[in-house]
Amino acid sequence: MSKKSFEPEYMPIGILTAAIQELTPRDTRDADPDAAVEDWLEFANELGADVIQLSAALHPDESDVPPEAMLDPVANTLDLRKPFTKDRAKRVLDAVDHTGVGIADIGYFDNMLHDDPAIRASKHDFMLRVFDAAVELGVPAVCGFVGRNQKLTMDENLADFEQSFIPLLIEAKARGLEYRIEQCPMPGWTTGDNFHNNIAYAPGPWIALHRICERHGVGDQFRIHYDPSHAILMGQDTRSIFQFLKEEGYGSIVSGFHVKGQVVDSRGISSWGYGGQTMERGDWIDGKESPNAADHANAWAKQTAIAEHELPGTARHDPLAYLQNRTVDWLDHQLAARELLDLDVTNVPLIVEHEYPPARIQDRALVAPILEGSIAFTRKIDEAAACMYALQNEVLPGQGIPVQGLGRVAYRS
């Protein structure tokens, strides 16, 4: 019998800067792009965050999607219309040193398999600028989507991925970066009928894509930035997903986390099922896609008719919903990550992503206590999970003492 000391390990807690896109007014940050990053580092420090996930996006003047067709303002906290020079990087890194808030990675969430070659080329060019900015800032990864070519079947998209996306991963490898894929299916990204508009939406596709990456020597670049809200949207639970990855030998594929929940609307499910609203949304008029770009946002009823995003801590404690996979069981989420994945826990941030619609307030004073509370909740949940894990997996076994009960079981129905 050996004595094991109690040494819980905690994850850093961060926030995606898209949480409040207008923290720095548009006219200010357009004229002085790096002011927005400085402001966000100061704000994150006030909120009690350890790190930020720095949001990048094509400027509204450059995007192929009209602003009025989007649910949220464009979150280009990192403005890359002009080269991100060493002088710009020094200014940002000085703010990092001043605030004590680090940069976990850079997030650029766009369709990298767009069916229009010119639009795809512009997105790839921007992603390469994101890569270069990540190098200048000394961050280990970028975070984004794969996307989907709407003109191709899913199997054909695998071939398109191999031809078009692998070169991006080769560029990432050359720069020593990971490309962390968020698994949102993006059901409202288009006005068409497809629910899965990001082909990397679940563990089965992750493995299929990773095998392609392995053939080209970029398997270590393809990683997953796991977000439990998307699992809930598709009827999955975190523990079962992580168990599946472990059994398939992919326990190391997750290297980042978004902390965002989903609350499934049982009435909406009764009305539409898990495919969401499929007709009479308002994005099509008289049998044609509406000419009004603002109407295109109605396509998101594929998701919003059946569920609503949760900012961690804002949804009621609901054990029955946890068991039905209709909201995130945050404590078990953090336990499962430690028990089933291959993680260097202290270097894997939990990034709070704020998309709870009623609380999407573009007012710093009003949104600050909301975000502060969510970040504190996330930290305490992780601390609780860390303590349970250390006790149950290290201290008690070291003394031959059994752990009580069964806990949540993967694949249980």
Image (cartoon, grey):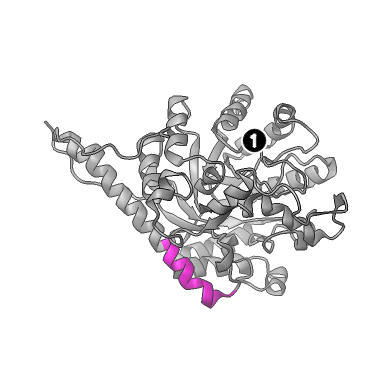
Report the predominant secondary structure element of the magenta stretch. helix
How dense is the environment of label 1, judged by Cα within 10 Å: few (below 14), some, or many (20 and up)? many
The answer to which quarter of the image holds residue 372 is bottom left
Left or right, 246 with respect to 301, comes to left
Relative image position of residue 345 (x, y in whole percent): 38, 44
**168 up-or-down from 102: above or below:** above
At 59% from the left and 24% from the top, the residue drawn is 211
Give yes or no for residue 369 being in the magenta stretch.
yes
- Amino acid residing under circle 1: Leu
> Residue tagged by mark 1?
169
Residue 31 on the magenta segment: no
Residue 246 lies in quadrant: top left
Residue at image coords 42%, 47%: 322
Q: Is residue 85 visible?
A: yes
Quadrant the C terminus occupies = top left
Front one among 360 and 127: 360
Q: Residue furthest left?
A: 1
- Magenta stretch? 363-375
Q: Which type of secondary structure does the marked residue at label 1 adopt?
A: helix
Quarter the N terminus occupies = top left
